[in-house]
């Protein structure tokens, strides 16, 4: 977010792609925190898979995901599970323009076609980190249950809190997570 360049931000020790976590070896972390992050992922299935991959057996993943009904995403359609699966299987490039168009139209309220296309091109050129996917509490639960069929983890907590849903997942013994 270039608009934050002038802010006095906390110095960080590690900079990595949060979707891939390439700098972390498998099963090396006790916990991962993804606070209002998953909605920014173009491939949320792959991102959560990588978060689970880096956790030690018994490690904990904390995720807080906004419920679209209580945010600026309220007018956007819910992202169906089939879309998430396709983003994961085919890579998300197929849907990127669609996400930016939806964002420009329904969040930035760009109404005219020329302005819409200009805004989409700007967002795409900078790969601006919008909320690519949006859910209500029920679709988030469907998403987590679909992941549960793929990988070995327990759902330790699901908590609806104001405009978000909090999930605490615990990595279990099982097959290697991709």
Image (cartoon, rainbow, N blue to C red):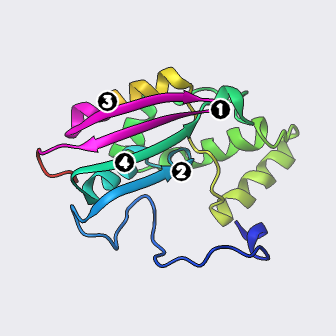
Horizontal and vertical percent for residue 25? 25, 69
Q: Nearer the viewer, mark 4 or mark 2?
A: 4
SS at mark 1?
loop
Numbered label tally = 4
* Earlier residue among tags 2 and 1: 2
Q: Are marks 4 and 3 in contact (CB under 8 Å)?
A: no
Q: Are marks 3 and 1 in contact (CB under 8 Å)?
A: no
What segment carries the magenta color? Answer: 147-173
SS at mark 2?
loop
SS at mark 3?
helix
Residue sitting nearer the eye, 165 or 139: 165
Q: Nearer the viewer, mark 2 or mark 1?
A: 1
- Neighbor class of circle 3 (other Cα within 10 Å; few <14, some 14-19, many 20+) is some
* Earlier residue among tags 4 and 1: 4
Q: Within the image, what quadrant is residue 121 found in?
A: bottom right
Name above or below for residue 21 compared with residue 108.
Answer: below
- Neighbor class of circle 2 (other Cα within 10 Å; few <14, some 14-19, many 20+) is some
Residue behind mark 4: 61
Residues under labels 2 and 1: Cα distance?
A: 14 Å
Q: Which mark is residue 37?
A: 2
Residue behind mark 1: 163
Residue behind mark 3: 146
Residues under labels 3 and 1: Cα distance?
A: 23 Å
Horizontal and vertical percent for residue 91? 40, 50
């Amino acid at each position: 977010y270039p608009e934050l360049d002038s802010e006095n931000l906390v110095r960080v020790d590690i900079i990595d792609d949060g979707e891939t976590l390439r700098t972390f070896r498998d099963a090396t972390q006790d916990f991962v925190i993804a606070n209002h992050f998953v909605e920014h992922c173009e491939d949320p299935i792959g991102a959560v898979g990588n978060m689970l991959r880096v956790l030690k057996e018994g490690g904990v993943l904390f995720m807080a995901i906004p419920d679209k009904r209580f945010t600026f995403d309220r007018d956007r359609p819910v992202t169906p599970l089939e879309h998430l699966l396709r983003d994961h299987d085919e890579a998300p490039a197929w849907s990127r323009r669609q996400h930016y168009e939806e964002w420009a139209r329904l969040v930035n309220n760009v109404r005219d076609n020329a302005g819409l296309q200009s805004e989409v091109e700007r967002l795409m050129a900078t790969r601006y980190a919008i909320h690519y996917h949006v859910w209500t509490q029920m679709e988030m639960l469907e998403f987590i249950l679909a992941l549960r069929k793929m990988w070995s983890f327990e759902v330790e907590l699901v908590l609806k809190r104001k405009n978000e849903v909090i999930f605490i997942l615990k990595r279990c013994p099982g097959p290697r997570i991709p």
